[in-house]
């Protein structure tokens, strides 16, 4: 079988523990793996698997082909997931299906504060390990502003599986629902992909690497020419999953349905001093854009922004107001000079961008900006554009700070939208392809209509899928994420596309590498232009043919318009 097989390292799993095999492990060399059968398949953020077939040569290594053992292929370790022995003609072969070792994070489990658990004598990480009989409040269900490294840290810091991680490139913090909720390692990685759809997770064994789009997709100056580097280019053009319009539904808040000037049970007392004490208890709480507090609910001490802080202080006194600066403008009337509990707005009416709360006539308290905490400053330090007074808060401020805590509570509330749900379509996509309606685009955090439209454009599928599959002349090693210039000269098709998948036979001398390239708006435009040029060429050929026929043949000297069009269509197909 010399020349038909290739040696592969194989290592037995010890007690089911996950690690990258090293010199301290008992590693055998499998000599009977058929070279042409060894295949690696990768698809961005989806598939990373391998397969091989080996024959029984009576070796120890062949007998290690058991599920959950490790095999090294082209420098990466894979875990055996399925084996299919076949007995035929006196020979035993085994077909083996493997998964990249990083996929084993699906076996890991992290329990956060939302799921108390008694670990007993079992080692654990990533959770408090609390075994209290008290049912914990589900603070993890709140939307929080995070970065990819925050989610990775919560899941993998202190793990005993040998897993490390890197974040490569620049990411903006975004709001994520329940970023630290209990789940598997795969659940945590899926949250990252869901929050940053352009990111790519491409591991090096057990080093999990999260790339930004621009750091993963790189142009190294390579090109693929049809009939030069490849004899097969397949294009798939598909509108099935398109959506360019739908109903947009944004965030909501609770609004009192009855007037209420009293205090809820257990709240602070009446009077200016009570309001001051209540507001000051949040000093030091970090600024978190879109964070908890007030009408948004959740644990305010986990982080608030400027408007949810004001909403929270009002809520502590039984006054429900929205946690959105512009909406708060409608919750009071303008005054010339502030008193305790008044709201100070920055910007113009109807477009305010920041809010503060007056502690007294000369001092204010507020959540400043990302990276800072709730603090107090003199009003003269950064005077608001104007002040507003809420009558319910003013009534409480004017009350006696006597310790009497028996005021009336709210009798009801109703859910209100920050803006009415509305129909939206992306005009550029509509002009090109027509209407492709789909389900609602929703957000629990977006409170601005324009921001909602920008968000919808990121969720829509504005163009058809155009998948390009190229079979190379040979089994060259693919470079995941490489941006390549693709030319199909006979069809006038030239475009630049990123590689998002491949099938590779690293040890074969005959099996060709197949690479898959993703579509974007420019690729589709390039394809449309190539089709237009092809049709124009055919039309010119028809005109030339007609002209030549009129001087050399008898009978019908000209074609009808329908005949010419029929000929053009046949050539085009």
Image (spheres, rainbow, N blue to C red):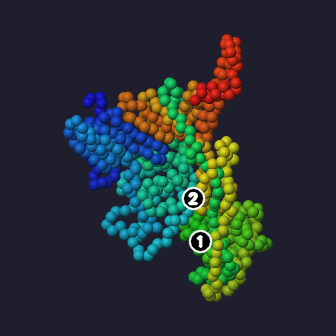
Name the residue at the front extreme: 555
| Residue 386, image quadrant | bottom right
Residue neighbourhood size for the residue with mark 2, other residues' Cα within 10 Å, grouped as few (<14), some (14–19), many (≥20) = many
- Measure the C-alpha gap from mark 1 to mark 2: 22 Å
Q: Quadrant of the N terminus?
A: top left
Q: What residue is shown at x 34% (from left), y 48% (from top)?
A: 81
Structural crowding at the residue carrying mark 1, measured as other residues with C-alpha within 10 Å and reported as few (<14), some (14–19) or many (≥20)? many
Q: Nearer the viewer, residue 424 or 19?
A: 424
Secondary element type, mark 2: strand
- Whether residue 378 is visible: no
Question: In the picture shown, does residue 251 fall above or below 521?
Answer: below
Q: Position of residue 394 (x, y in %)?
A: 72, 79
Between disc 1 and disc 2, the foreground one is 2
**In the picture, residue 246 is in which quadrant?**
bottom right
Q: Earlier in the sequence, mark 1 or mark 2?
A: 2
Q: Which residue is mark 1?
A: 282
When the figure is inspected, residue 89 is found, relative to residue 570, above or below; the finding is below
């Amino acid at each position: 079988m010399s020349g038909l097989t290739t040696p592969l390292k194989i290592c037995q799993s010890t007690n089911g523990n996950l690690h990258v095999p090293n010199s301290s492990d008992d590693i055998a060399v499998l000599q009977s793996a058929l070279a042409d059968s060894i295949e690696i398949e990768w698809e961005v953020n989806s598939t990373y698997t391998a397969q091989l077939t080996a024959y029984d040569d009576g070796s120890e290594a062949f007998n290690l082909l058991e599920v959950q053992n490790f095999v090294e292929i082209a420098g990466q370790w894979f875990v055996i997931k399925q084996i299919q022995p076949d007995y035929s003609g006196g020979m035993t072969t085994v077909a083996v299906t493997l998964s990249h070792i990083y996929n084993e994070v699906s076996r890991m489990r992290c329990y956060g504060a939302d799921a108390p658990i008694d670990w007993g004598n079992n080692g654990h990480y990533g959770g408090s390990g609390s075994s209290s009989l008290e049912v914990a409040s589900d603070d993890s269900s709140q939307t929080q502003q995070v970065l990819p490294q925050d989610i990775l840290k919560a899941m993998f810091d202190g793990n005993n599986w040998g897993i490390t991680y890197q974040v490569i490139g620049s990411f903006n913090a975004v709001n994520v629902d329940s970023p630290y909720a209990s789940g598997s390692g795969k659940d945590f990685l899926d949250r990252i992909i869901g929050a940053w759809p352009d990111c790519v997770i491409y591991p090096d064994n057990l080093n999990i690497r999260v790339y930004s789009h621009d750091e993963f997709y790189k142009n190294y100056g390579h090109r693929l020419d049809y009939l030069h580097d490849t004899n097969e280019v397949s294009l798939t053009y598909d509108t099935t999953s398109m959506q360019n319009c739908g109903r947009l539904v944004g965030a909501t808040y609770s609004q009192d349905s009855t007037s209420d000037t009293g205090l809820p049970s257990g709240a602070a007392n009446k009077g200016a001093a009570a309001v001051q004490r209540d507001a000051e208890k949040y000093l030091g709480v970090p600024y978190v854009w879109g964070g908890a507090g007030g009408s948004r609910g959740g644990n305010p001490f986990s982080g608030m922004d400027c408007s949810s802080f004001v909403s929270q202080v009002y809520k502590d006194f039984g006054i429900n107001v929205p946690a959105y600066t512009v909406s708060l403008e409608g919750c009071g009337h303008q005054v010339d000079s502030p008193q305790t509990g008044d709201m100070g707005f920055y910007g113009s009416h109807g477009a305010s961008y920041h809010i503060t709360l007056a502690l007294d006539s000369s001092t204010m308290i507020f959540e400043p900006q990302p990276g800072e905490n709730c603090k107090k400053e003199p009003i003269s330090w950064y005077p608001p554009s104007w002040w507003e007074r809420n009558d319910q808060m003013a009534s409480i401020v004017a009350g006696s700070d006597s310790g009497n805590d028996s005021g009336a509570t709210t009798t009801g509330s109703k859910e209100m939208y920050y803006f009415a749900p509305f129909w939206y379509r992306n005009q550029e996509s509509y002009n090109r392809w027509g209407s492709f309606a789909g389900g609602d685009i929703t957000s629990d955090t977006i409170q601005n209509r324009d921001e909602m439209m920008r968000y919808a454009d990121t969720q829509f599928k504005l163009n058809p899928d155009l998948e390009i599959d190229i079979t190379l002349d040979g089994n060259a090693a693919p470079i995941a994420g490489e941006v390549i210039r693709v030319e199909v000269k006979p069809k006038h098709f030239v475009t630049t596309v990123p590689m998002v998948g491949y099938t590779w036979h690293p040890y074969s001398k005959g099996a060709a590498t197949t690479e898959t390239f993703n579509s974007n708006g420019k690729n589709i435009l390039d394809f449309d232009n190539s089709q237009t040029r092809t049709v124009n060429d055919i039309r010119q050929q028809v005109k030339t043919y007609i002209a030549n026929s009129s001087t050399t043949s008898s009978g019908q000297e000209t074609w009808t318009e329908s005949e010419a069009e029929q000929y053009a269509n046949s050539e085009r197909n």
